[in-house]
Amino acid sequence: MDPVSAPDRTPALRRAVTEVIANFGLTPDDSLEPTVVVPAPRVRDAARALAERGFMLMDAVGVDYLRYPDPRPARFAVLYNLYHPYEHLRLFLRVWLEDGQSVDSLYPVWRAANYLEREVYDLLGIVFGGHPDLRKILTPDDLEGHALRKDFPLGETPTLFREGRFLDPASFRAGLTGESRGLTGWRGELRRGQGEDRVPPVMPEGPQ
């Protein structure tokens, strides 16, 4: 049936999704988008139930909460972005994982998980059990560690601009944070609404 002329099935689908959430013991998450928390051992079963109701996997991302100011259930989270193309419903699945904890791959449910999970593995080191080809996809093979972990060491080199001016990363960062003027001529507290006694330079007024 043409989805444009098909009757509105959204209420029935919403009830079906509610049943999936109840049957798998999922709990709503405090988020701006519709999100439910899925225990790691149940994520594949929950995903398969939602796929049977027409949901597609649009994206999968990983988050490292190592330096997050508020307490989190675990250091890492994997977020699966699901979408129903006919009913225009979106649902996020969040899986909390401790460092070193793995989660089942969703490749058996959605083939789109292949490269999405490889990216999360490459950048955060999260292992997806049962993935058919879990290897790096973005960073060089000889790079040690995972670049999006909050404890990944950052290397910096001075930037040379066309006019011959150098920007030193450490001095630039110090200027932004308010530790010193650095090379920016600005102090960080001005950006936070403080330090009004030190007015930053302004451009001269042009012709009216």
Image (spheres, helix red, strand yellow):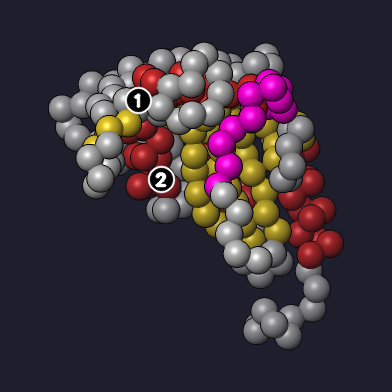
Looking at the image, residue 1 lies above or below residue 195: below
Residue 71 at what x, y percent from top left? 67, 14
The N terminus - image quarter: bottom right
**Looking at the image, which residue sits at the far front?**
207
x then y, percent, for residue 34:
73, 45
Using residue 138 as the reference point, say whether residue 26 is left or right of it: right
Q: Residue at x 78, y 45 (%)?
A: 19
Name the one closer to the observer, 87 or 22: 87
Residue 116 is marked as 2
Image quarter for residue 167?
Answer: top left
Viewer can see residue 154: yes
Query: Which is nearer the eye, 139 or 48?
Result: 139
| Residue ID at (79%, 78%) | 7
Image position of 94 (left or right of 118): right
Q: Earlier in the sequence, mark 1 or mark 2?
A: 2
Residue 101: tell me if it is visible: no
Q: Total number of numbered labels?
A: 2
Which residues are drawn in magenta?
191-203
Asked which quadrant contains residue 20, the reply is: top right
The three-letter amino acid code for the residue at tag 1 is Pro
The amino acid on which the numbered mark 2 sits, given as a three-letter code, is: Leu
Question: Does the magenta-highlighted stretch encompass residue 98?
Answer: no
Residues 30 and 192: in front is 192
Give left or right: position of 157 versus 180. Answer: left
Residue 155 is situated, as x and y percent measured from the top left of the image, at 28, 22
Q: Residue at x 70, y 59 (%)?
A: 89
Assign the magenta stretch its main secondary structure.
loop
Residue where numbered disc 1 is placed: 169
Q: Is residue 208 left or right of residue 76?
A: right
Q: Secondary structure at mark 1?
A: helix
Q: Residues within 10 Å of mark 1 (few under 14, many from 20)?
A: some
